[in-house]
Image (tube, rainbow, N blue to C red):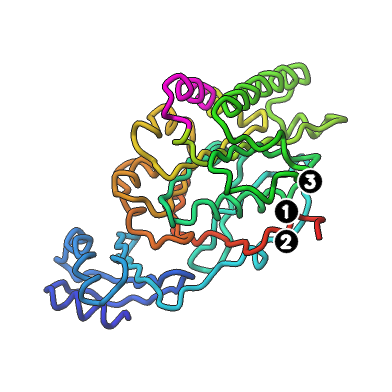
Amino acid sequence: MGAALVDTLHSFKLGVDYQGAVTAPAFIRVKLKPHPGVKVASLLNRSADLQVQLGLANPPLITPQAGYVSVDLPRLDRQVAHFDHYIQPAHSSPTEPIKIAIGVDLNGQLIEADLSEPNTCHFLVGGTTGSGKSEFLRSLLLSLIFQHSPQNLKVALVDPKRVTFPEFESMPWLHSPIVKDTEPAIDLMTELVDEMEDRYRRLEKARCGDIKAYNRQATQPLPRIVCIFDEYADFMAEKEASKELEQSIKRLGAKARAAGIHLIIATQRPEAKVVTPLIRSNLPGRVALRTASEADSTIILGGKQSEAAYLLGKGDLLYHSGAGLWRLQSLFAEKVTLPGNA
């Protein structure tokens, strides 16, 4: 594949040297070094040409890297990153970091995000139909409950489509019954804001800077609360509802990390009128599965990062963290079996 890629680019008068390849579950990343005088921009503009000439089902994602240009070619024998290959039940103490599984990298290593860190304390997740967004949210939720007991973790779920979290209806980790309608969703977010303010009063009284310090000395540690909000766009049609939700997300996004409350807001329609600048500015962590357009990709990832429009779907994702942009494969849990359940 690398040889065919180099030959095709040479036919366009674009000289490159093959620098090796790495195999990911969904694609093969070929590393190319442009010859002196060959502009990187001229390679970036060849995605559609390569799709046609190489007979690819999807246009390859071409990205400048440190010292080379990567070309991600779809695999014909696509592999699955099975959840149980990477995560096993292991309950952590209330003072340990709380991490969520994002996906598997090019080296087959699981990449996690620490919700107690400022750059990854809250997440915005976007992906169109078929992108694997629901499976990503389910594997993320499972990674939490596999590693934390119900005493140390509570999960609030918002599921307006009623199909993302059916197996989790009666689990002991639930903060409250799964929310499926607009008014209860507004009430839940308001309740989380009130809980945040109450926790800050406790932290102040105990002279602690955050929940980790508080739990280290408390006789009754406070559980972390993670709110996973699927299909946020469904609640944005009503003007009053959208305004109330935005204000709650703004307050939680700005202050809730130290109190141990974290938001994961997901939508399959990351349009500007849905994911407003107010929402984006308060959700620092970003995960983009395949989007319907380049514009949707830039809304999720920020800047001019339109790459999510060229992902392969079914859990192929881009994770934006402080360290840069990672292309990962989401975990897939074929059958949901909660820890301690038969």
- CA distance separating discs 3 and 2: 13 Å
Q: Which mark is residue 149?
A: 3
For this orientation, the residue located farthest to the bottom is 3
Q: Are marks 3 and 1 in contact (CB under 8 Å)?
A: no
Tell me the crowding category of disc 3: few under 14, some 14 to 19, or many 20 or more residues within 10 angstroms, Cα based: many
Q: Are marks 2 and 1 in contact (CB under 8 Å)?
A: yes
Residue on which the image places disc 2: 88
Amino acid type for the residue under numbered disc 3: Ser
In this orientation, which residue lies closer to the viewer: 34 or 251?
251
Q: Where does residue 228 sit, x and y in percent of width and height?
A: 59, 40
Asked which secondary structure carries label 1, the reply is helix
Residue on which the image places disc 1: 146
In this orientation, which residue lies closer to the viewer: 16 or 133?
133
Above or below, comparing residue 180 to residue 65 in the picture: above
Q: Where does residue 295 sit, x and y in percent of width and height?
A: 29, 44
Magenta stretch: give its range. Answer: 235-250
